[in-house]
Image (spheres, rainbow, N blue to C red):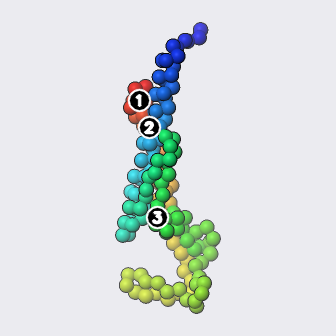
Amino acid sequence: MPVEFPSDELNDIIDKALRAVSASTRLTATEVWGNLGREAPVDEGRLAASFNLERLSDEEYRITSNVLYALFVQEGTGVFGPTGQPIVPVSASVLVFEIGGETIFARSVRGMEANPYVDRAMDKAEMRIEEFAAMALQEVGL
């Protein structure tokens, strides 16, 4: 037996459903953004504080960082990174850098292991998607 809805009631349900999708997306994006700040490794706190959340539309958000090394921390470098090769000098005979106030000279370095903080931030948000959907439905009255 078919169920009939008056068109204004159906339009109200559709409008509320669309608003619920928007609210759920906003809650999820905000959670990922907050998780990034909590999951990013903290030395001076520059990376953790660098994430910006931008709303592109009701269903699309973008999170960016202006810290140039953010991707290197996520993916690793040298033998631990995408190339799988040690880091070697390009225009000098040795690498020169400072660690803890001590100047280091090296022909090569192995690099840095990946710290997949973005993956952890996404995983934590994903575990809450049902909660965000329920909150969004309640927010719009469905």
User: Is label 3 in contact with label 1 (beta carbons under 8 Å)?
Assistant: no
Q: Is residue 128 above or below residue 41?
A: above
User: Is label 2 in contact with label 1 (beta carbons under 8 Å)?
Assistant: yes
Name the quadrant of the N terminus.
top right
Q: Is residue 130 above or below residue 72?
A: above
Is residue 114 shown to the viewer in this render? no
Type of amino acid at the residue the image marks with label 1: Val
Is residue 12 shown to the viewer in this render? yes
At 49% from the left edge and 69% from the top edge, which residue is drawn? 69
User: Residue 34: image x %, image y %?
Assistant: 40, 52
User: Residue 66: image x %, image y %?
Assistant: 46, 64
Structural distance between the alpha carbons of marks 2 and 1: 9 Å
Name the quadrant of the C terminus.
top left
Label 1 environment density (alpha carbons within 10 Å; few <14, some 14–19, many ≥20):
some
Q: Which residue is mark 3?
A: 66
Q: Secondary structure at mark 3?
A: loop
User: Residue 6: image x %, image y %?
Assistant: 51, 13
| N-term-proximal mark, 2 vs 1 | 2
Q: Which residue is mark 1?
A: 140
At 48% from the left edge and 23% from the top edge, which residue is drawn? 13
Q: In the image, which disc is placed on residue 23?
A: 2
- Farthest bottom residue in view: 93
At 42% from the left edge and 64% from the top edge, which residue is drawn? 47
Structural distance between the alpha carbons of marks 3 and 1: 35 Å
Label 3 environment density (alpha carbons within 10 Å; few <14, some 14–19, many ≥20):
few
Describe residue 59's horizontal placement relative to residue 90 as left or right.
left
